[in-house]
Amino acid sequence: MEQKNLEELYHKGELEWEEGEYTVCRGFQWTPPGCHNSCGILYYLKDGVMDHAEGDPLFPYNNGRLCARCLNLHEAGYQENRLKYPLLRKKEDRGNIDAFERISWDEALDYIANYVKNEIDGKGYGRESIFGMVGTGRNICWQVPWIINNAFGSPNTFCALFSGDSCAVPRTAATVALMGGYPVSDFGQFNEQMMDYPDFTVPGTILIWGANPLRSNADCFQGFWITDAMKRGSQLVVIDPMINWMSAKAAVQIQIRPGTDAAVAMAMNHVIMEEDLYDHEFVEKWCYGFDEWRERCSEWTPEKAAEVAWCDADDIRKAARFIATNGACAAPFGVSNDQKRNGVAAYQSIFNMLAITGNYENPGGNTIAYDPWGTVMSYVAGWDEGVLTPEMKAKRLGDKEFPLHSVGFSALGQPDILMKALETNNPPMRMSFCMGTNPFVNMAPDASRAYHALMNVDFAIACDYRMTPYIAGCVDLVLPIAMNWERNTLRCWFTPMRANRKISTYYEAKSDEEIVVLLGNKMNPEFFQSKGISTDMDMLEYIVQQAPNHTWSFQDLYDGKADGKNYDWPDRPYYQYKTGGLRPDGQPGFATATGRIELWCTMFSNLGLEPMPKYEEPAESPVSTPELFEKFPLVLTTGARNFEFFHSEQREQAHMRATYPDPRVRINPEDAKELGVSDNTWVWIEGKRGRCRQRALITEGIMKGVVEADHGWWFPEQDGNAPHLFGAFDSNINNLTENCNPGPYSFGADFRSTLCKIYPCTPENSAVMPGTEVVVNGGFTKNPEYGNPAVAAYGEQQ
């Protein structure tokens, strides 16, 4: 029998072919449902319906490997409760799913246009009273600013009510200020040959700090690259309150108290500098403020940091020495430090450590990432050329209060200021447009408070592929979203540039791009027609043509004419700071005022902010609030990832729930014994602002005195009508987290370092469930058992 090689089996150079009863289409999967990456995928269609998906072995990024979420795409796409048509109801019917009535797309667009004309413009509110909400960084992020800026003419887009923009933004703020760009750990992915690229060297050390990349697969990063590198000799340093698979394989593993990361990182810097382990040449030529940084770290001995972080001083020394002496160090970051008030300082400290050890732009170190063509399509990248006047731009919420927002460190408004506006009606925020977020289930801290704030919006629009608690409770007009294989689109965060083709349709669901064009031509036809944008394909081509370095047209990439591929993967050389590749003026150095990595940050100093990292205790901790700690004696961290779910998605999928049916809180066996808690039983997790219930998972993997709880939980199998809202509050760990108390740079909030207590659920203490407490009784704040005022201006919450 003739043996076919892999390229023949998988039809190299073809985007579509017949295989028995199936039509096979080559593409890339990202969202919806969500993911941070864009793996090569083969969609198998039968009679125009996507039957199943497999990984594409010819795409080097994932080499045919897929996660459980991609392998379960058929269930996601054809679930019973998927939204098929636009739906409309009256504001007074919120909470009643049966009140939604099917309408056409034309009716939906007319309704939006008439509302803006009569209720926004007609009553003199101003277009700035229209705001957009986006979710986590997926392909939908750039479309919402297009809609808000270019269709509605408002400057106000927000990362929902996500206090402190606590995902990636604290990290990017720190790195853009320090080095003028965003570093991503280098596993060869910036070149098509990946780890076989001739100039690539496998990392000697992989630093994993508060992340689980095997599960999370963060930006431009596949978790299995770590195991690939380990097979080639890489060793791990893992710092985390939890022990996981990587911790068990690590050369150095340190469990630390949540929220103390900056202290530990400064102590590691202390060891490297005091023991003369830093890269002298790189520091002398390419670092600014070394002496000041050395002085700042001088007090942070390993002993002092160990006392603060509940760890061992010798482990801190060992980790620091390992990073400094074991070859290149790659650091694949998650969001754990984004989700702490002191997160910017923690990231600065870690990035400074990587700088003084020479681990930027080196093979196997950390690459300053940028999109290959320079397109304006990365996270929340808006477009406002000629649409927003300077006067309108000045009305973006948060710019006046926070200097980093005012100088462009974020393309978003500040969500804590939005929360204040929604609660006080100052300024009035009348209409919302939401894509890709389930706000009070997943992103918004103090979920009870967020729910009531969102109910104050007069007219709420949401785009999604299924009914969510937010839609059931707070939304008036629903627009059904197409799945990834039902859309034409482009993915470029970061490399390679990928084009995706629409290969199937589902009832009246439309892609995010199609909705941009429909709303744009309805609300602001002059702008969209002046750019020649009448279809989604027009818009994607327009964006590509504006990119300064595009190699191909969108159409050529879409048709697979890019050297026979539907992606473009230009080689990116190392040591770009030596050749001028990192600066807009083409001069050697980094894109900062000094041309160096700024250990002492001139940008922060010029804006009146602390120029170097400074350790601060979490707002709630055994140290900062000892009286509160007596009442709530456990340190709570939240948000760890798992294989089955992407934040609040996939809860409706039976295959995912079969392996992970209920939310879990991880408890150390000694703590569980003291609390009288048994494994797999329901327990209450209670804090200063509220409570929720989850199943206890008793494990030695969590350090004593710390508990780690799941996030994003709701129950699609339950009643979706108010007050139940699919159980949105009953297991919602954000009942306990704090809103309107971001970090000193306006970025970061304490999702991962608060205080709580745990006790078994009983019929008596479960008589009033959180859903009733929030929706019927007005929220936990109405209950004298809980402490926060129902409405508080920014900075006044105690």
Image (spheres, rainbow, N blue to C red):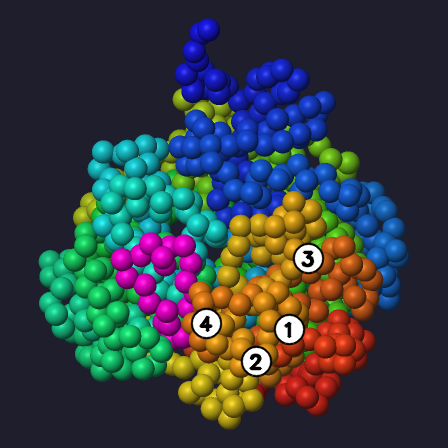
Q: What residue does disc 3 label?
A: 433
Q: Tell me whether the residue at label 2 lies in contact with that at label 1, contact meaning CB atoms closer than 8 angstroms.
A: yes
Residue 340's tag is 4
Kindly report the distance in space between the C-alpha atoms of the residues bearing marks 4 and 1: 25 Å
Amino acid type, label 4: Lys
Q: Is residue 631 visible?
A: yes
Which disc is residue 675 wearing?
2
> Could you tell me if the residues under marks 2 and 3 are in contact, i.e. CB atoms within 8 Å?
no
Residue 455 as seen in the image, left or right of residue 203: right
Q: Amino acid at mark 3?
A: Phe
- Residue pictured at 37% horizontal, 69% vertical: 255
Identify the mark nearer the N-term, 3 or 4: 4
Between the C-alphas of marks 3 and 4, the distance is: 28 Å
Look at the image and give the residue range highlighted in magenta: 241-261
Magenta stretch encompasses residue 545: no
Question: At numbered mark 1, what does the secondary structure look like: helix, strand or loop?
Answer: strand
Work out whether 73 lies above or below 722: above
Q: Amino acid at mark 1?
A: Val
Q: CA distance from mark 2 to mark 4?
A: 27 Å
Question: Residue 614 location in percent, x, y?
Answer: 32, 78
Write down the residue under mark 1. 683
Quadrant of residue 437 within the rendered picture: bottom right
User: 214 or 667, which lies in front?
Assistant: 667
* Separation of residues labelled 2 and 1 (CA atoms): 10 Å
Q: Nearer the viewer, residue 125 or 162?
A: 162
Label 2 vs 3, first from the N-terminus: 3
Q: Is residue 519 left or right of residue 679?
A: right
Q: CA distance from mark 3 to mark 1?
A: 36 Å
